[in-house]
């Protein structure tokens, strides 16, 4: 059984195909945000690029996520600062801020700049939030501390951080739009066409499959692990209560309302962490029930649930993606493993891998060097 997301129900327009004869210079495997971003950059530079998507554009995590467009990486800024050092953490945050800015220019009405709210579920998380605010402020990044919450949130949470530049996406609309821009720039986009990276003809092949990376490149089995996330959508609520991305318990719970007041809510992976380490696109009763319990805690009832789905992302041991040439391969490149935080970084990393193929050496590539992990060769 596979699930279909609410976002993917929006009608799709056919992509323009200019028709590219013969073997492309670069083949991109995967039509999510990463693959479309990579194809756009290459096509704009005059490279003959063909993108192969096994299903439809945005069929993977890119069309199944919560639609949170957040700057930064998968871990809070202070954690990344301890992990990477101040200079490299700053470089990562700045890269993501530039990508978010670019996204807001490319996405049109698929993006709304709302800011996002990271909430503290208890006193321990409240002090963790303070740690992130202090580190962000020390390094000059915009952030606001919210000590006193209003309305519903006041009784449930112990404070928050407001990230003013973040926003909310209709993620499938965004990535379909990105694919259209790539096609208009000359990329040949072929849907319903599964391919194997080692078999596809091209001088260079980019694997842009995030959670499905190790299906295509088994050497990366320990470096990028498939991880399942589950989401549900309710019928429109009576009132608009959450007009921006909200997340709590370090991202294990997340929710937002759409302009028509539907609640989009997901997470609860931690009720069965081991079962959620899978590439099976299926919802489970235990996680869906836990998400419904969160709905009840937030709004006092569970309205009709209209959609439920699952999606797969790729998690890496250090929470950072892998972007660059596959170690030991002349021809295969990789961009993926955003550890659940790929909406903005996927745009950035698709462009980075394209530039690396073109022979450029953007400094941020060093952060994401695939050879930092020992591969299963
Ligand atoms: C439930 C959920 C919630 C999330 N929430 C957020 C969020 O709010 N904010 C955020 O930043 N990130 C979030 N993420 C993570 C984010 O969605 C991903 O990191 C990002 O979309 C990855 O994009 P991608 O293009 O690298 O991979 P994908 O979008 O997964 O695209 C990979 C594509 O490769 C295709 N493919 C696979 N095998 C083949 C083959 N053999 N041949 C051709 N094509 C193939 C697949 O069909 C798929 O379309 C979430 C993910 C999930 C699942």
Image (cartoon, rainbow, N blue to C red):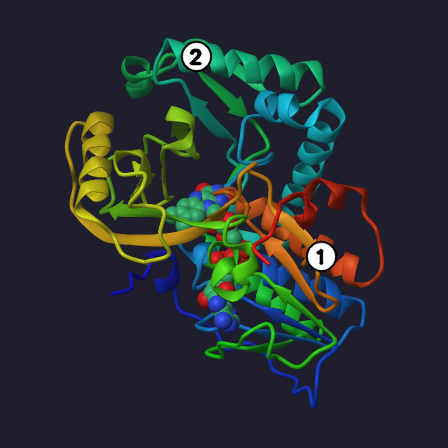
Say which quadrant the N terminus sits in: bottom left
**Which mark lies nearer to you, 1 or 2?**
1
Q: What element carries label 2?
A: helix
Nearer to me, 2 or 280? 280
Residue sitting at x 59%, y 36%: 71
Q: Is mark 1 within 8 Å of ligand 1?
A: no
Residue sitting at x 53%, y 43%: 316
Q: Quadrant of residue 27?
A: bottom right
Residue sitting at x 32%, y 41%: 266
Would residue 345 be found to the left or right of residue 153 on screen?
right
Q: Where is residue 368 in the image (x, y as percent from the top left)?
A: 68, 44
Q: What element carries label 1?
A: helix
Q: Mark 1 points at which residue?
A: 353
Number of numbered tags placed on the structure image? 2
Q: Where is residue 252 in the image (x, y as percent from the top left)?
A: 37, 32
Question: Disc 1 versus disc 2: distance between alpha carbons?
Answer: 37 Å
**Residue, far bottom:** 21
Verify CB contact (< 8 Å) between mark 1 and mark 2.
no
Q: Answer above or below: position of 353 versus 273.
A: below
Residue 109 in sight: yes
Nearer to me, 277 or 119? 277
Say which quadrant the C terminus sits in: bottom right
Q: Answer above or below: position of 60 versus 148.
A: below
Q: Residue 166 carries which label?
A: none
* Number of residues whose C-alpha sits closer than 10 Å to that of mark 2, classed few (under 14), some (14–19) or many (20 or more): some
Q: Where is residue 137 in the image (x, y as percent from the top left)?
A: 66, 15
Q: Position of residue 297 (x, y in %)?
A: 21, 26
User: Which callout, 1 or 2, points at the residue further toward the start of the chain?
Assistant: 2
Residue 159 in sight: no
Nearer to me, 273 or 364? 273
* Number of residues whose C-alpha sits closer than 10 Å to that of mark 1, classed few (under 14), some (14–19) or many (20 or more): many
Q: Mark 2 points at which residue?
A: 126
């Amino acid at each position: 059984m596979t699930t279909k997301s609410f976002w993917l129900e929006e009608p799709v327009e056919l992509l323009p195909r200019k028709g590219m004869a013969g073997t492309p210079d670069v083949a991109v495997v995967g039509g999510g945000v990463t693959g479309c971003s990579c194809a756009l950059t290459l096509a704009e530079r005059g490279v003959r690029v063909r993108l192969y998507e096994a299903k439809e554009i945005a069929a993977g995590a890119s069309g199944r996520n919560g639609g949170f467009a957040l700057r930064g990486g998968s871990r809070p800024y202070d954690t990344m600062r301890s992990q990477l050092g101040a200079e490299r953490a700053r470089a990562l945050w700045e890269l993501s801020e530039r990508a978010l800015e670019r996204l807001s220019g490319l996405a049109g009405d698929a993006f709304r700049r709302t800011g996002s709210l990271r909430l503290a579920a208890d006193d321990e998380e409240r002090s963790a939030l303070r740690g992130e605010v202090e580190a962000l402020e020390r390094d000059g990044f915009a952030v606001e501390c919210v000590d006193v919450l209003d309305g519903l949130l006041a009784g449930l949470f112990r404070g928050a951080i407001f990230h003013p530049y973040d926003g909310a996406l209709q993620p499938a609309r965004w990535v379909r739009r990105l694919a259209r821009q790539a096609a208009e720039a000359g990329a040949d986009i072929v849907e319903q066409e599964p391919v194997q990276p080692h078999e596809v003809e091209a001088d260079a092949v980019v694997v842009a499959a995030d959670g499905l990376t190790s299906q295509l490149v088994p050497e990366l089995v320990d470096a990028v692990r498939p991880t399942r996330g589950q989401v549900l959508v309710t019928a429109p609520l009576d009132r608009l209560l959450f007009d921006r991305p909200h997340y709590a318990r370090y991202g294990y719970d997340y929710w937002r309302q759409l302009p028509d007041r539907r609640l989009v809510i997901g997470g609860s992976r931690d009720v069965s962490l081991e079962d959620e380490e899978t590439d099976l696109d299926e919802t489970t009763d235990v996680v869906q029930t836990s998400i419904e319990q969160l709905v009840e805690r937030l709004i006092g009832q569970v309205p009709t649930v209209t959609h439920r789905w699952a999606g797969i992302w790729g998690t890496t041991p250090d929470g950072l993606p892998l972007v660059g040439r596959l170690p030991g391969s002349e021809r295969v490149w990789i961009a993926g493993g955003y550890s659940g935080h790929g909406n903005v970084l996927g745009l950035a990393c698709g462009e980075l891998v394209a530039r690396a193929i073109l022979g450029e050496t953007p400094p941020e590539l060093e952060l994401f060097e695939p050879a930092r992990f020992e591969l299963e060769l």
